[in-house]
Amino acid sequence: MNAQPIKRYRARHYVLLWTIVGIVFLLLQPLTWGVKLPQVFWTKQVYHLIILVALYYANTNIAAPALLFRKKIWLFIAWAFTSVTLVTLLGQWINNQLHFFEAMSRALGRPPHKPGNFDGFMMITSLLIMGISTSIVAYERWQQVTALREELEKEKISAELAFLKAQINPHFFFNTLNNIYSLSFIDVNASRDALQKLSRMMRYVLYEAQHDTTLLSKEISFIDDYIELMRLRLSENMQVVFRKPQYFKDDAIAPMLLMPFIENAFKHGVSNIDNGTIEIVLAEEDDLLLLTVTNPLIAANPNKVAEDYGGIGLQNTVRRLELTYPGRYTLNTEREKEQKYIVHLSIKLS
């Protein structure tokens, strides 16, 4: 955790605190009396200020961390009571040694005071110093805990995203390699073209998908390559329609985030016998990116296909959406007359 902001905060408040205390002790208090003060007054003020500074740092650096933050509340209360009492008695002892009250009585033209007068101002000031120092160190502690919690949460999210991306990418390439393997028995040249496209896609995964974001144009190009690769193995009865905006804002987007929805459309919507159309529509509305994927449900039991539709790729993608775009996305799925499966995804990119 970066402690520099907390240190700067502490330094600023130390300077502010002791500037205020110094002005009150050394300037404002005597200036309000309108009398010529003896030298002993200034000596007493300096001694008392040193004592209060020592009390402040003892409480801030030793007592509060050792007692208050370790849930030893009663010991901290005992420390506070004892320290205020000792500071008050020490201040009174200094007053007696300097014959402070006698000197002040002469300066103010009053009857002399007897030695041992109680210094209520010193006690009140020491209580204020205890309260201020405890409040400041408690706030610093809260800042540290909050900063550490935020840092741990960021590290947790980063680690989880990296794990999810590591799951999605092999999942995608496993399916793609299976497609190319099947194609190699039918058309060697087509399989070579497919390997070239796959090589280009792998470069994208290696150099772009490892970052947190990529440009939308690069993601669209990746989808184009994938669709062209899938077309090589489709029969004539299957059609693929990809509609994308001609003009769009090239915003940043999490890489490989849209692919699992498109990949699942090919996984569950392709048939070598039945006619069908896979339709992929990508659009922009203001700052929203909209993806709609429609595919036929090709299976003896369409309900079973729909149940299996949320495999590991989609599950991880939903989790990535939650982590990357919390509160900024909507995802809905629907079935149309048990024949089509439709995915609607909306992401607020900015």
Image (cartoon, grey):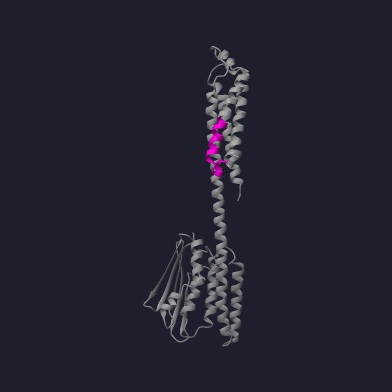
Q: Read off the magenta span.
A: 67-84
Between 192 and 257, the residue placed more toward the observer is 257
Percent from the top left, x then y, of residue 184? 59, 85
Query: Compared with residue 24, is residue 113 higher up or lower down, i.e. above or below?
Result: above
> At 54% across and 75% down in the image, what residue appears?
226
Q: Quadrant of residue 134?
A: top right
> At 60% across and 73% down in the image, what residue appears?
202
Residue 295 in view (yes/no) = no
Q: Is residue 82 magenta?
A: yes
Query: Compared with residue 183, is residue 105 higher up or lower down, i.e. above or below?
Result: above
Q: Is residue 55 magenta?
A: no
> At 60% across and 21% down in the image, what residue appears?
95
Between 53 and 13, the residue placed more toward the observer is 53
Percent from the top left, x then y, of residue 35? 56, 16
Q: Magenta: predominant secondary structure element?
A: helix
Residue 128 in view (yes/no) = yes
Between 62 and 312, the residue placed more toward the observer is 62
Farthest-out residue, left: 337
Tell whether 104 sits left or right of 342: right
Q: Quadrant of residue 222?
A: bottom right
> At 58% across and 36% down in the image, what residue appears?
59
Percent from the top left, x then y, of residue 183? 56, 84
Between 122 and 190, the residue placed more toward the observer is 122
Percent from the top left, x then y, of residue 288? 45, 63
Query: Compared with residue 61, is residue 292 higher up or lower down, i.e. above or below?
Result: below
- Tell how many labels: 0
